[in-house]
Image: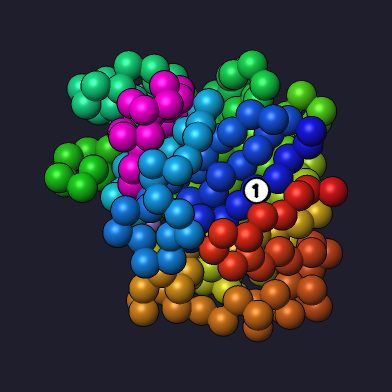
């Protein structure tokens, strides 16, 4: 029991929550870092931060095969319903919902959001997940640094998943300020090294996190798993 997560590359994670398989932003097909393929993944719930193709990814085929509930903003859920995925649950910022084994609260993110065909995907999001045992995870999605991360940090975070790639999201420098606001026990970098535009030195980033914040950095190779202590 407890929480363990596997980085699948980019912002995709397979997370085991007290024995329940969950996916974050499952972008496998076309992901140069992908450690597995979409047909290998199981899910009870798929959480989606926004509609961009590098996050929406393989959600439709995985949801259709597994019957997983897709939790995303209102516009993405409508789009899912139109693409044959009926098991959806819409949330928007500020709203929380108990999904059985996990409580999810939706947050803002500063970014954009459209589907691969260019249609409007609603606002981009992050989310805070709280397990039945009280472990709390924050997945920032694609976002810039914003000062309200301090309020998210006030919830008490065990782990934060933060983009560090720069160019499309916050980079390493801003992520250090985000960590100081969020105050998680552990921090996991994502959304880097997938393409040249977001190439980063995760080792150098981890050294700075250790030296300049109270959080412990967890740098994973694609396919690696970390059990949350
Ligand atoms: Ni994006
Ligand atoms: Mn992205």
Q: Which residue is mark 1?
A: 5
Q: Is residue 63 magenta?
A: yes
Question: 200 left or right of 226?
Answer: left
Establish if 118 lies above or below 171: above
Instruction: Indicate the secondary structure of the residue bearing disc 1.
Output: strand
Picture residue at 47% right of the left edge, 40% below the top: 41
Question: 205 left or right of 74?
Answer: right
Q: How many numbered marks appear?
A: 1
Residue 79 picture location, percent across and down: 25, 28
Residue 207 picture location, percent across and down: 73, 80
| Quarter location, residue 193 | bottom left
Picture residue at 70% right of the left edge, 45% below the top: 4
Quadrant location of the N terminus in the rendered image:
top right
| Span colored in magenta | 55-73
Residue 53 picture location, percent across and down: 29, 50
| Residue 123 appears in view | no
Q: Give 173 or 83, whichever is nearer the viewer.
A: 83
């Amino acid at each position: 029991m407890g929480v363990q997560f596997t980085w699948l590359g980019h912002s995709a994670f397979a997370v085991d929550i007290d024995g329940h398989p969950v996916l974050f932003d499952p972008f496998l097909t076309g992901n140069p870092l992908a450690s597995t393929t979409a047909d290998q993944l199981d899910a009870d719930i798929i959480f989606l931060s926004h509609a961009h193709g590098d996050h929406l990814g393989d959600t439709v085929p995985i949801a259709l095969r597994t019957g997983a509930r897709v939790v995303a903003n209102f516009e993405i859920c409508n789009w899912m319903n139109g693409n044959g995925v009926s098991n959806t649950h819409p949330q928007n910022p500020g709203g929380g919902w108990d999904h059985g084994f996990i409580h999810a609260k939706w947050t803002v993110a500063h970014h954009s959001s459209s589907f691969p065909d260019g249609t409007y995907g609603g606002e981009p999001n992050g989310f805070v997940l709280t397990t039945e045992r009280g472990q709390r995870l924050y997945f920032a999605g694609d976002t810039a640094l914003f000062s309200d991360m301090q309020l998210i940090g006030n919830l008490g975070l065990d782990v934060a998943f933060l983009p560090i790639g720069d160019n499309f999201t916050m980079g390493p420098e801003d992520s250090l300020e985000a960590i100081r606001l969020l105050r998680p026990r552990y921090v996991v970098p994502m959304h880097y090294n997938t393409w040249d535009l977001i190439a980063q030195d995760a080792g150098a980033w981890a050294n700075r996190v250790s030296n300049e914040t109270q959080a412990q950095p967890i740098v994973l190779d694609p396919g690696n798993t970390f059990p949350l202590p």
